[in-house]
Image (cartoon, rainbow, N blue to C red):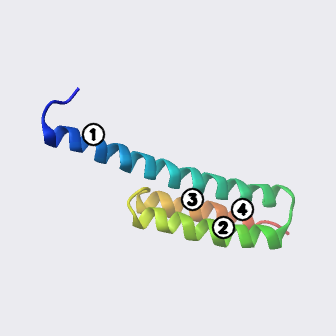
C-alpha cells in the first residue's frame, strides 16, 4: 500500500479513469452487438440506425483516448462494410 500522498492520489485517479474507460468500452461493445444482431436478421434499416449510433460512440471513445484512432477507424470500417453487404 502506498504511503506517500501523491502515490495515494495516483491510485485514486487511475482507478477513476479505469472505471470510466471500462464503462465506455462496454457501451461500445453493446452498440456493436446491436449492429451485428441487425445484420444477422438482414434488417438493413435497423442496422443502418444502429451503425450510426455505434459509429458516433466509437468516434467519441477515440477522441477521449480510450481507443487508438486506427482501432476506432478499423471498427467503424468493418461494421460499415458488413451493413453495406446486406441486400
**In x, y percent, where is residue 21?**
44, 51
The residue beneath circle 1 is: 11
Nearer the observer, 30 or 43: 30
Residue 42 shown left or right of residue 60 in the figure: right
Q: Secondary structure at mark 1?
A: helix
- Tell me whether the residue at label 2 lies in contact with that at label 1, contact meaning CB atoms closer than 8 angstroms: no
Density class for disc 3 (Cα within 10 Å; few <14, some 14-19, many ≥20) is some
- Tell me whether the residue at label 3 lies in contact with that at label 1, contact meaning CB atoms closer than 8 angstroms: no
Say which quarter of the image contains residue 63: bottom left
Q: Secondary structure at mark 4?
A: helix
Density class for disc 1 (Cα within 10 Å; few <14, some 14-19, many ≥20) is few
**In x, y percent, where is residue 40?**
82, 55
**In x, y percent, where is residue 38?**
80, 60
- Tell me whether the residue at label 4 lies in contact with that at label 2, contact meaning CB atoms closer than 8 angstroms: yes
**In x, y percent, where is residue 43?**
85, 66
Label 3 and label 4: CA atoms lie apart by 11 Å
Q: Secondary structure at mark 3?
A: helix
Label 2 and label 1: CA atoms lie apart by 39 Å
In the rendered image, the quadrant that contains the N terminus is top left
Query: Which circle marks residue 80 in the picture?
Result: 2
Q: Is residue 81 above or below residue 3?
A: below
Can residue 84 be seen?
Answer: no
Of labels 3 and 2, earlier in sequence is 3
In the rendered image, the quadrant that contains the C terminus is bottom right
Residue 63 shown left or right of residue 11 in the figure: right
Amino acid at each position: 500500500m502506498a504511503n506517500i500522498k501523491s502515490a495515494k492520489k495516483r491510485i485514486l485517479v487511475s482507478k477513476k479513469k479505469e472505471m470510466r474507460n471500462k464503462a465506455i468500452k462496454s457501451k461500445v461493445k453493446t452498440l456493436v452487438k446491436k449492429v451485428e444482431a441487425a445484420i444477422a436478421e438482414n434488417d438493413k434499416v435497423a442496422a443502418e440506425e444502429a451503425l450510426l449510433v455505434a459509429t458516433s460512440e466509437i468516434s467519441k471513445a477515440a477522441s477521449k483516448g480510450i481507443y487508438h484512432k486506427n482501432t476506432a477507424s478499423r471498427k467503424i470500417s468493418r461494421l460499415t462494410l458488413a451493413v453495406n453487404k446486406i441486400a
